[in-house]
């Protein structure tokens, strides 16, 4: 295969991926309906539903514009040989393959992020503000941005430098050692994420004594779950959207509840949300996801090791052979495989959500979890009727209607 054919393949992959995204977005528009779904008429305010439909249309138009900008930028970089131009400049600055890689991806990442800032600002301070979600300030936004750049430089740049060093030093052993390094890093992040990363952006406070803590402890004892620590995260400093998650494992296991949840939900609903998260833990979903991610990383490193030394990758982008330029060419070519793997992982993620729902519903009153899911959907203006193909490809969680239906079936079986 010639470098020209490979370049055309990269162009085709980029264009087809963009067209598929357009198609999926269009499919969702065919499901827009001003009529509230019948089964939610008694529990979903009609005026709120009208607002949800307006929000859906606004988001769609915004995504069309921002998506076209990103696509045009990437396509332009390919057509004018932008990656080769950047590579040529970096080669004139340093002979070190490690520094070359860090500079190459650092510049691309920084410029891409800077170009996305106008869209982020509009989304946050116009769209999210208009529909009642945004609570962040410009000061918080810029501090978050600076912190993200610093973390990307220290962690991302450091990890990349280590991977390139391993490649240069080990040759054929590169993929195994690189896989091992990334695996250790992944486990470390999973173990210490809430302790080390989250406090950089948010304040974590132990759940105070009171009705909620007592209810949680009572439920945890009922299902034989040892609670290590429960924290409240000040999510309201940025958004009114709520969330909850588990982090870590073993003695570093932490439950994190957004303070926005406490403002919107009853004690029973909050315990149901926590029960769902405990369901994930009981079914070992975190561990399974971690193992699947490690396997995927190993596959990626193995395939990368086969192709990374082939000069045709760099030549396809009009550049001199080198690890960093070959890596970005490989990324384009591997993206269809990543998409397929993403669909596979989303399938398992949705399955895990059903299992966690079933655990919560079978250990609590079914109605509490249903009420919590509905309230979350209402407050977040979630799409109630996304197209099935969009859900299949993009969604890591089942839709609200799918989850309510599954809970109803479970309730009928238990009677």
Image (cartoon, helix red, strand yellow):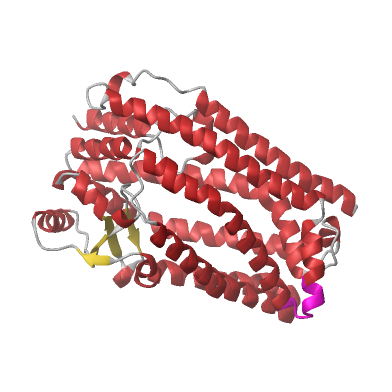
Q: Which region is colored magenta? A: 90-98
Left or right placement of residue 58 versus residue 6 in this view: left
Residue 33: quarter of image: top left
Q: Quadrant of the C terminus?
A: top left
The spot of residue 74 in percent (x, y) is 71, 49
Left or right placement of residue 63 versus residue 238 in this view: right
Residue situated in front as seen by the camera: 130 or 274: 130
Q: Answer above or below: position of 77 versus 198.
A: above
The spot of residue 135 in percent (x, y) is 33, 51
The structure residue drawn at horizontal position 49% and vertical position 42%, both measured from the top left corner, is: 347
Is residue 257 among what the camera can see? Answer: yes
The spot of residue 145 in percent (x, y) is 48, 63
Left or right placement of residue 288 versus residue 181 in this view: left
Residue 326: quarter of image: bottom right
Q: Answer above or below: position of 131 versus 273.
A: above
- 103 inside magenta stretch: no
Q: Answer above or below: position of 41 versus 324.
A: above
The structure residue drawn at horizontal position 40% and vertical position 27%, both measured from the top left corner, is: 53
Left or right placement of residue 254 versus residue 5 in this view: left
**So how many labels did they put on this image?**
0
Q: Main secondary structure of the magenta part?
A: helix
The structure residue drawn at horizontal position 48% and vertical position 46%, both measured from the top left corner, is: 122
Is residue 350 among what the camera can see? Answer: no
Residue situated in front as seen by the camera: 353 or 412: 353
The structure residue drawn at horizontal position 81% and vertical position 49%, both measured from the top left corner, is: 79
Residue 209: quarter of image: bottom left
Q: Answer above or below: position of 149 versus 13.
A: below
The spot of residue 182 in percent (x, y) is 56, 70
């Amino acid at each position: 295969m010639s470098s020209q054919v490979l370049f055309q393949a990269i162009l085709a992959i980029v264009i087809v991926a963009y067209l598929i995204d357009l198609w999926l977005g269009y499919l969702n528009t065919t499901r827009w309906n001003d009529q509230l779904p019948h089964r939610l008429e008694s529990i979903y305010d009609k005026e709120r539903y009208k607002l949800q439909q307006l929000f859906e249309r606004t988001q769609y138009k915004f995504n069309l514009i921002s998506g076209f900008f990103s696509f045009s930028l990437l396509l332009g970089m390919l057509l004018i040989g932008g990656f080769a131009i950047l590579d040529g400049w970096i080669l004139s600055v340093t002979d070190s393959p490690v520094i070359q890689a860090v500079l190459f991806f650092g510049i691309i990442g920084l410029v891409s992020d800077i170009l996305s800032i106008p869209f982020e600002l509009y989304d946050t301070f116009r769209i999210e503000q208009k529909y009642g979600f945004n609570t962040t300030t410009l000061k918080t936004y810029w501090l978050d941005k600076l912190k993200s750049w610093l973390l990307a430089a220290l962690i991302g740049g450091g990890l990349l430098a280590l991977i390139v060093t391993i490649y240069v030093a080990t040759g054929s052993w590169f993929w195994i050692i690189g896989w091992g390094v990334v695996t250790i890093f992944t486990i470390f992040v999973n173990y210490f994420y809430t302790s080390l990363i989250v406090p950089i952006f948010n304040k974590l406070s132990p759940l105070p004594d009171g009705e909620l803590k007592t209810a949680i402890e009572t439920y945890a004892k009922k299902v034989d779950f040892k609670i290590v620590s429960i924290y409240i995260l000040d999510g309201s400093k940025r958004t009114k959207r709520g969330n909850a998650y588990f982090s870590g494992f073993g003695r570093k296991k932490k439950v994190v509840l957004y303070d926005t949840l406490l403002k919107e939900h009853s004690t029973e609903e909050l315990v149901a949300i926590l029960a769902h998260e405990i369901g994930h833990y009981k079914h070992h979903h975190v561990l399974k996801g971690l193992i699947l991610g490690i396997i995927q990383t190993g596959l990626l490193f193995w395939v990368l090791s086969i192709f990374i030394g082939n000069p045709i990758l760099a030549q396809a982008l009009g550049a001199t052979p080198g690890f960093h330029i070959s890596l970005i060419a490989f990324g384009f070519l591997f993206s269809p495989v990543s998409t397929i793997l993403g669909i596979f992982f989303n399938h398992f993620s949705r399955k895990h959500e059903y299992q966690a729902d079933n655990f919560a519903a079978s250990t609590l009153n079914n109605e509490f979890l249903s009420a919590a899911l509905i309230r979350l959907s209402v407050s977040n203006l979630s799409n109630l009727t996304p197209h099935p193909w969009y859900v299949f490809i993009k969604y890591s969680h089942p839709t609200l209607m799918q989850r309510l239906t599954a809970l109803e079936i479970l309730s009928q079986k238990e009677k």
